[in-house]
Amino acid sequence: MSLPMPQPSLPIVIVEDDEGMRRAMARLLKAAGYSTVAFESGEALLQAGAAEHAACFVFDVRLPGISGFELRRQLSPAGTGVPVIFVSAHEPPPGEPTPQIGVAAHLLKPFTREALLDAIERAMPTVPNEGC
């Protein structure tokens, strides 16, 4: 039996417009021991100011308003070291300039629970949880 991996004290920030998918990802990550905070749009994330306090981002690519790619571009100066995992039901269009800073994975929907957890584990260094 293996011991649970130590988790970072900062949350994984999820931005997904589909409520069911947003809830499912948050439940899965919480069950795996991660702290999460979820938003329905990039604008909601920016208004909340939660991007400055994230261990990892999980962004849907096609969001109403600001796309996941554009959201990453806007956050790059403040969150350069924060990895991002893109999720999408569609392959990126050919020639779509995707931000390369901190992109850890691009998962196509529907993806498995294991695929998301593996991407999170690869994206984030193991950091002891400091009780936050």
Image (tube, helix red, strand yellow):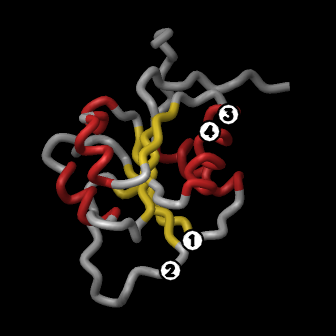
Q: CA distance from mark 4 to mark 2?
A: 23 Å
Q: Secondary structure at mark 3?
A: loop
Kindly identify which residue carries mark 1.
108
Q: Which quadrant of the figure has residue 2?
A: top right
x, y percentage for residue 52?
A: 25, 33
| Amino acid type, label 2 | His
| N-terminal-most mark, 4 or 2 | 4
Q: Is residue 107 left or right of residue 102?
A: right
Disc 1, disc 4: CB below 8 Å? no
Q: Is residue 49 left or right of residue 14?
A: left
Kindly identify which residue carries mark 2.
90
Kindly identify which residue carries mark 3.
32
Q: Secondary structure at mark 4?
A: helix
Residue at the spot x=70%, y=24% of the render? 4
Label ID, residue 38: none
Residue at the spot x=50%, y=9% of the render? 131
Label ID, residue 29: 4
Which part of the image, by quadrant, shows the N terminus?
Answer: top right
| Amino acid type, label 1 | Leu
Sort mark 3 into few (<14), some (14-19) or many (20+) by Cα contacts within 10 Å.
Answer: few
Disc 4, disc 2: CB below 8 Å? no
Q: CA distance from mark 1 to mark 3?
A: 21 Å
Point out the residue furthest to the bottom here.
94
Q: CA distance from mark 3 to mark 2?
A: 27 Å
Disc 4, disc 3: CB below 8 Å? yes
Disc 1, disc 2: CB below 8 Å? yes
| Amino acid type, label 4 | Leu
Q: Secondary structure at mark 2?
A: loop
Give the camera-side residue of 11 and 129. 11
| Amino acid type, label 3 | Ala
| N-terminal-most mark, 1 or 2 | 2
Sort mark 4 into few (<14), some (14-19) or many (20+) by Cα contacts within 10 Å.
Answer: some
